[in-house]
Image (cartoon, helix red, strand yellow):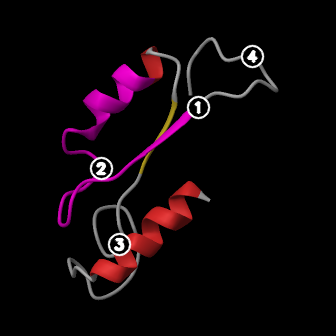
């Protein structure tokens, strides 16, 4: 969240996730910081089965579930 965002105020939001097998700690924090500094609220997340996300089997890529994860993050 932007530091100067007043309580009860709204900010545009950017939702970010790495492609396929990447995790949120790779590259995304640098971009997210720049977006926050520009006044955007930014959500960075890991797809299920990767990084800090839960679920089994680990490190498996199911494209339709990636889409569902993006939709859930936006919601």
Q: Mark 3 or mark 4, which is nearer to you?
A: 3
Disc 3 and disc 2: Cα gap in Å?
Answer: 14 Å
Q: Which mark is residue 24?
A: 2
Left/right placement of residue 71 relative to residue 22 reads right
20 inside magenta stretch: yes
Disc 2 and disc 4: Cα gap in Å?
Answer: 27 Å
Labels 3 and 4: the sequence-earlier one? 4
Q: Residue at the spot x=76%, y=24% of the render?
A: 9
Q: Secondary structure at mark 1?
A: loop
Say which residue label 1 marks.
12
Left/right placement of residue 10 relative to residue 23 reads right
Q: Mark 3 or mark 2, which is nearer to you?
A: 3
Labels 2 and 4: the sequence-earlier one? 4
Labels 4 and 1: the sequence-earlier one? 4
Disc 1 and disc 3: Cα gap in Å?
Answer: 23 Å
Relative vertical location of residue 17 with respect to residue 37 in this rendering, above or below: below
Say which residue label 4 marks.
6
| Residue 48 visible somewhere in the drawing | no
Q: Residue at the spot x=44%, y=15% of the render?
A: 37
User: In the image, which residues are magenta?
Assistant: 12-35
Relative vertical location of residue 7 with respect to residue 55 in this rendering, above or below: above
Relative vertical location of residue 38 with respect to residue 46 in this rendering, above or below: above
| Residue 71 visible somewhere in the drawing | yes
Q: Mark 2 or mark 1, which is nearer to you?
A: 1
Disc 4 and disc 1: Cα gap in Å?
Answer: 14 Å
Labels 1 and 3: the sequence-earlier one? 1
Residue located farthest toward the top when viewing the structure as drawn? 4
Say which residue label 3 marks.
66
Query: Where does the image place residue 26, in percent across and percent down from the top left?
Result: 19, 45
């Amino acid at each position: 969240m932007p530091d100067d965002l007043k309580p009860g105020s709204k900010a545009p939001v950017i939702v970010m996730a790495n492609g396929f097998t990447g995790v949120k700690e790779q590259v995304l924090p640098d971009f997210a910081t720049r977006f926050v500094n520009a006044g955007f609220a930014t959500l960075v997340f890991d797809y299920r089965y990767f990084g800090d996300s839960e679920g089994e089997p680990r490190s498996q890529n199911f494209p339709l579930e990636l889409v569902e994860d993006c939709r859930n993050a936006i919601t």
